[in-house]
């Protein structure tokens, strides 16, 4: 089980990325556009530096929805491999069967 603070930190980052994502995208477009003049680009860089770093999508970590485990998480199920295996073995995930040969 992951620490509650790390899980909460990640949910906070997800909220911030969702709310400030549009603003970041506009500023990045201004910065990357070579046709804008240097003053506008510099002003966009300054504004982008004032936006919180945690609002970047790169800082979001995929975590297990049940345990908060940061590694070996399947995106499709939003679950860690060990919890996915447990639930599949119990038959609680529709259509998933444990393989045997």
Image: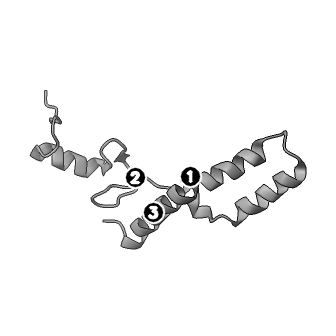
Q: In the orientation shown, which residue stands out farthest toward the bottom?
A: 5
The residue that label 2 is drawn on is 71
Q: Position of residue 9 (x, y in %)?
A: 46, 68
Q: Which mark is residue 58?
A: 1
The quadrant where residue 59 appears: bottom right
Q: Position of residue 78 (x, y in %)?
A: 33, 49
How many discs appear?
3
User: Residue at 10% of width from left, 47% of height from top?
Assistant: 90
Q: Residues within 10 Å of mark 3 (few under 14, many from 20)?
A: some
Q: Is residue 77 left or right of residue 100?
A: right
Q: Position of residue 100 (x, y in %)?
A: 13, 31
Q: Mark 3 to mark 2: distance in Å?
A: 14 Å
Which label sits in the foreground, 1 or 2?
Answer: 1
Q: Residues within 10 Å of mark 1 (few under 14, many from 20)?
A: few
Q: Is residue 12 left or right of residue 50?
A: left
Q: In the orientation shown, which residue stands out farthest toward the right?
A: 38
The quadrant where residue 74 appears: top left
Q: Mark 1 to mark 2: distance in Å?
A: 16 Å
User: Residue at 36% of width from left, 71% of height from top?
Assistant: 4
Element under disc 2: loop
The residue that label 3 is drawn on is 10
């Amino acid at each position: 089980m992951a620490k509650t603070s790390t899980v909460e930190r990640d949910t906070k980052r997800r909220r911030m990325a969702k709310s400030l994502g549009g603003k970041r995208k506009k500023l990045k477009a201004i910065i990357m556009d070579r046709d804008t003049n240097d003053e506008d680009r510099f002003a966009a860089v300054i504004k982008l530096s004032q936006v919180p770093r945690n609002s970047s999508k790169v800082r979001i970590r995929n975590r297990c929805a049940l345990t908060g485990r940061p590694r070996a998480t399947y995106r499709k199920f939003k679950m860690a491999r060990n919890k996915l295996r447990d639930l599949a073995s119990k038959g609680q995930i529709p259509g998933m069967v444990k393989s045997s040969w």
